[in-house]
Amino acid sequence: AKYVYRFSEGGKDQRDLLGGKGANLAEMTKIGLPVPPGFTISTEACRAYMEKGRVPPELRVEVTMALREIEDRIGRRLGDFHEPLLVSVRSGARFSMPGMMDTVLNVGLNDASVRGLAEFSGDERFAWDSYRRLVQMFGSTVLDVDGAHFAAALEEKKRQAGAATDVDLTVAHLQDLVEAFKGLVREQSGREFPQHPREQLDLAIEAVFGSWNTDRARLYRRRERIPNDLGTAVNVVAMVFGNLGETSGTGVAFTRDPSTGHSGAYGDYLPNAQGEDVVAGIRNTLALAELEQLDPTSYRELVQAMRRLETHYRDLCDIEFTIERGKLWLLQTRVGKRTAGAAFRVATQLVDENLITMDEAIARVTGAQLSQLLFPQFDADADRDLLTKGMAASPGAAVGEIVLDNAQALQRTAAGVDVILVRRETNPDDLQGMIAATGILTARGGKTSHAAVVARGMGKTAVVGAEEVSVDIGAQEVRINGTKLQPGDVIALDGTTGEVFLGRVPVVDSPVMRYVAEGVHAGLEACAGDDDMRELVLAVDRILTHADEVRRMSVRANCDTATAARQARERGAEGIGLCRTEHQFLGDRRGHIERLVLASTDKERAEALAALLPLQRADFIELLEAMDGLPTTIRLIDPPLHEFLPDLTELAVTVALANERGETGEDAARDAALLTEVRRMHEQNPMLGMRGVRLGLKVPGLFALQIRAVAEAMVERRRAGGDPRPEIMVPLVGSVREMQIVRDEAEEVLDEVCRSSGELLEPPIGCMIELPRAALTAHRIAEEADFFSFGTNDLTQTTWGFSRDDVEGAFFADYLENGVLTISPFETIDGDGVGALVVAGVTAGRHTKPRLHIGVCGEHGGDPESIHFFHRAGLDYVSCSPFRVPVARLEAGRAAV
Ligand code: ADP
Ligand code: MG
Ligand code: MG
């Protein structure tokens, strides 16, 4: 095997083999940018190391050959006593991964070569500063000495020397420090700091390999869903020095502003410093513009290099660079991270510059970014008082009174007040409070903590792990950075940035939301004079429009009412994928259901149903009007009937009280009869009980009523000149026979209405596929169904045997922590399990009916990753909540390019 690649041999598309850093260093070398000579040890070598538990012997040979080439090119040898070559050893996996060993600089320095370096550079202080850094970095990253020891020794030295920053330390101080650091290495690791340059290099390489498998790295990969067997590459790069006095320095730069996308050079520069100083924040950096004054030649060269990179990568790049005595070197580049708004702006700017196509532009943004832009925001013009910042766990802007427990949360929300639940951390006992709250703030825990998972599941704003927050339940007090707060005090959470503010911050609709809901004109109007925002609204419009053009799947919405349907339509929905009819039985109409349940004769039952007919018909007329011309999938009643009846315990109490008082009136008799029925219908597992099609078969006339209401509504709409397109959907089907019975009943009703109205009515009759058995027998069910719609919520519940309402708060956080789950299967479809059933159902259904129309309704229809899955599975549409429609349009487009 070949393990070592010169920078001149690789390229940007080899990230699997060379890691991100290595691939881009090679690419920059290839296009002639000034990169110090170096080579990359491939991820394959790391995999060989993991397999054998030792470095493959050929690797040592290949490293020697590549190293000698560098030495010959530069004319200096690694760790030479006179003119030493030094190198950096840098890890770099396919994905950037905190938790792994990062970088050791100045490898090759020892007690002798440090003097050589001093003489050859003419800067003794620089040489000792570099040596001090090597012992420190090598000690902490390669030999596992706790870095705090070195930091403490450095602080102590600065204090003794009266030095404000480490630049003020003299040669003598640095020499003392090197000795102290070597002592620390000896004490803490039980071995001497290795003096031999090649031994330093080999140990550093091995340490990078080893760091792939530390607990921290494994945990990180599990959370980010990065496979464990990729391995990391190692980059060995000739050192260039930013710490060689005032004509040297180091910095980071972006080719465009990563928050607005505007082109120009953005970044930070630190004179007389080595790489890690910039990010470590030990001294204040200068804005990149100031480099133009300090060193115009290098600045110009840097700006040119950035233009090359943008042209080459056709994207915003970020860069690490170092200037050594007026000579510019590039040490890293990658396609830069950016804010959601910048992602849209940059994508369309690049299209306008003819650097990318619109197809590429939609691939450069994500549905997650779009949904960030849709959340309400704090009014940017309002005064805000920042208390602290935590992790942005669940987006949105929430304002409310502080509450510290469930009782307070329930009490205040009952009084109509918005509350923010503040906890050290949350656990399943806090669920009630979390449900009541508008926002959740915790002091502990990360993005997969209980609070974060549950909040995202419920769509609540949450900021977690805000470490400066301390909650004292005993004293009923929250302290944040010296501010003392009590229950009742108002705070505001920004779940998109993690910021926590004191007091009430006004919330406004984002202009992007206004655009999505009301069109370009309204969106632009909402921007007022904000040009960046206007540019963003126009960018989102262009990208969404293009996504609509290229997507294969259509996007429908889940709407139960005409109002929701109109909203969905405005947002671009092309139909309703799921109208739940159960809400039509709530409120005043409960009485009809009670009568239906209590009916003892066919006549009584028929009367109860007849009373419901005009009500249902009116609902459907409204809905079909709102969705005129578009498919409108109406699901027959799904939940168990007792959900519409009084609560068992409450009713039992009422009846008992009535008995005690000796009441014998009509009401008392009805309550008593109802209680008997409620008792009879009580179920241990309602989710798996008398619901869906089972209910329709059990209660004669119930489905027929709904179907008649649909048919009559169709007639009515047609007579009004409309184009109603209802589709009738049967829930919870598990067997073709169930479908057959319902279908026969439906056709009978439809025939009747056809005859009496003289209209031809043939609405498609299909079913939900939401039980594993339905997916597995889909070839049979398709014989009786005109369409399928995957109900992936129930399908997930029944495939995993999870009851969603019970498990999410109870143990999902544990399951995410220990790696059973990488994400909630109710959030993103579990491709391996539930997804396999979807694929099986599609294949089997289309085996029977090649053109069977198939969609998905349920939360997954609005989840980006799931949408890509459904595209691949060959579905015709996804249906999601009206709010998610724009996100689904974008992702369906992205899935198609
Ligand atoms: P990270 O992935 O944490 O950024 P890097 O490997 O990029 O780690 O290195 C850390 C710092 O050291 C960066 O600022 C980088 O520019 C600098 N650096 C790395 N190699 C060299 C080198 N050969 N010469 C000078 N500076 C270097
Ligand atoms: Mg870097
Ligand atoms: Mg269902």
Image: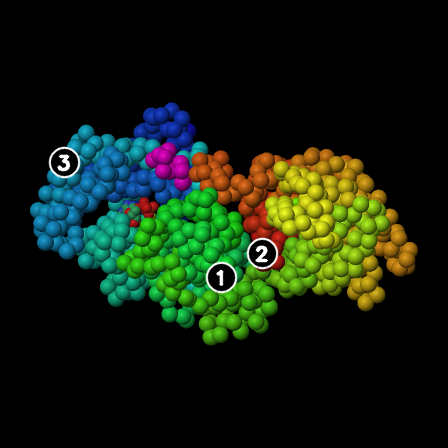
Left or right: residue 829 compared with residue 22: right
Mark seen at residue 70: none
Q: Amino acid at mark 3?
A: Gly
Q: Would you say residue 256 sits in the magenta stretch? A: no
Residue 667: % across, % down: 71, 53
Badge nearest the viewer, 3 or 1: 1
> Within the image, what quadrant is residue 228 found in?
top left
- Residue 277 or residue 863, whichever sits in front: 863
Residue under label 3: 183
When asked about the image quadrant of residue 142, the answer is top left
Task: Mark 3 or mark 1: name the one nearer the start of the chain.
Answer: 3
Distance from disc 2 to disc 3, alpha carbons, whole Å, reads: 60 Å
Q: Tell me which residue sits at (34%, 28%) in the image.
A: 55
Residue 309, percent from left and from top: 41, 55
At x 70%, y 40%, the residue is 680
Q: In the rendered image of this protein, does residue 812 appear above or below residue 385? A: above
Question: Label 3's element?
Answer: helix
Front residue of this view, candidates 639 and 822: 639
| Spot occupied by residue 875 in the image (x, y as percentages of width and height) | 67, 46
Q: Secondary structure at mark 1?
A: loop
Q: Main secondary structure of the magenta part?
A: helix
Front-most of 26 and 357?
357
Q: Is residue 155 left or right of residue 5?
A: left
Q: How many C-alpha atoms fall within 10 Å of the one at disc 1: few (<14), some, or many (≥20)?
A: few
Kindly identify the amino acid type of the residue bearing the numbered disc 1. Answer: Ala
Q: 876 or 822: which is nearer to us?
A: 822
Estimate the x, y position of residue 6 in percent, counting from the top left: 36, 40
Q: Which residue is mark 2?
A: 884
Q: Report the magenta residues as a range.
A: 211-222
Numbered circle sitting on residue 415? 1
Kind of residue at badge 2 = Arg
Front label number (2 vs 3): 2
